[in-house]
Image (cartoon, rainbow, N blue to C red):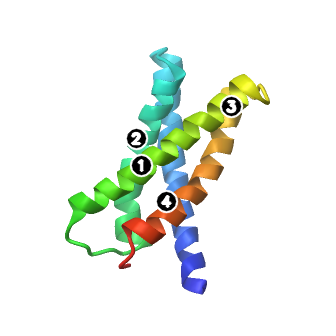
């Protein structure tokens, strides 16, 4: 149980770096380039997911699986499912239920999706770790 908790802490630390990447890309694309907020959110998420995969593979799970293409595909599949959950939460909180601001809704979505991502990657992507 200690090992699982330590991996979750490392996964969360990696997630914080991804959070910074995600918010920076989202902000630049949405506010500076003035593109659609869901496109900006998706692009931020994609950059963060790629960075997080590399850091989680090498640091969190210290994974040596040589089939990186299959593993990255699994990781991205989980990230895409997380992205769908992320966008649905943002849509629901901004437009339907709470009328929350976009960035507060994004933060709530990230907290929920991080749990999904850890559980799914622990049990599916990095199972041999």
Foreground: disc 2 or disc 3: 3
Q: Is residue 2 above or below residue 49?
A: below
Q: x, y (%) of residue 32? A: 49, 18
* Residue drawn at (53%, 19%) of the image: 31
> Which residue has dot 3 on it?
92
User: Gap in Å between the C-alphas at discs 1 and 3?
Assistant: 23 Å
Foreground: disc 1 or disc 3: 3
Q: x, y (%) of residue 113? A: 58, 50
Foreground: disc 4 or disc 3: 3
> Which residue has dot 1 on it?
49
Left or right: residue 117 versus residue 95 is left
Which element type, helix, strand or loop, lies under badge 4? Answer: helix
- Disc 1 crowd rating (10 Å Cα; few below 14, some 14-19, many 20+) is many
User: Gap in Å between the C-alphas at discs 4 and 3?
Assistant: 27 Å
> Would you identify the image quadrant in which residue 73 lies?
bottom left
- Quarter of the figure that contains the N terminus: bottom right
Left or right: residue 63 versus residue 32 is left
| Circles 2 and 3: CB atoms closer than 8 Å | no
| Circles 1 and 2: CB atoms closer than 8 Å | yes
Looking at this view, is 20 or 7 the one in front?
Answer: 7
> Which residue has dot 4 on it?
14
Mark 1 or mark 3: name the one nearer the start of the chain. 1
Mark 2 or mark 3: name the one nearer the start of the chain. 2
- Quarter of the figure that contains the C terminus: bottom left
Mark 4 or mark 2: name the one nearer the start of the chain. 4
Which element type, helix, strand or loop, lies under badge 1? Answer: helix
Which element type, helix, strand or loop, lies under badge 2? Answer: helix
Q: Is residue 105 above or below residue 126?
A: above
User: Gap in Å between the C-alphas at discs 1 and 2?
Assistant: 5 Å
> Which residue has dot 2 on it?
46
């Amino acid at each position: 149980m200690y090992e699982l908790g330590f991996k979750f802490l490392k996964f969360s630390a990696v997630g914080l770096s991804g959070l910074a990447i995600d918010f920076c890309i989202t902000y630049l694309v949405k506010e500076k380039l003035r593109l659609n907020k869901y496109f900006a959110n998706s692009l931020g998420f994609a950059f963060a997911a790629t960075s997080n995969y590399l850091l989680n593979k090498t640091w969190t799970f210290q994974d040596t699986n040589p089939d990186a293409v299959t593993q990255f595909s699994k990781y991205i599949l989980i990230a895409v499912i997380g992205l769908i959950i992320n966008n649905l939460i943002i849509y629901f909180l901004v437009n339907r239920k709470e009328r929350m601001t976009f960035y507060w809704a994004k933060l709530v979505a990230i907290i929920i999706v991080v749990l999904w991502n850890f559980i799914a990657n622990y049990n599916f992507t990095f199972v041999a770790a």
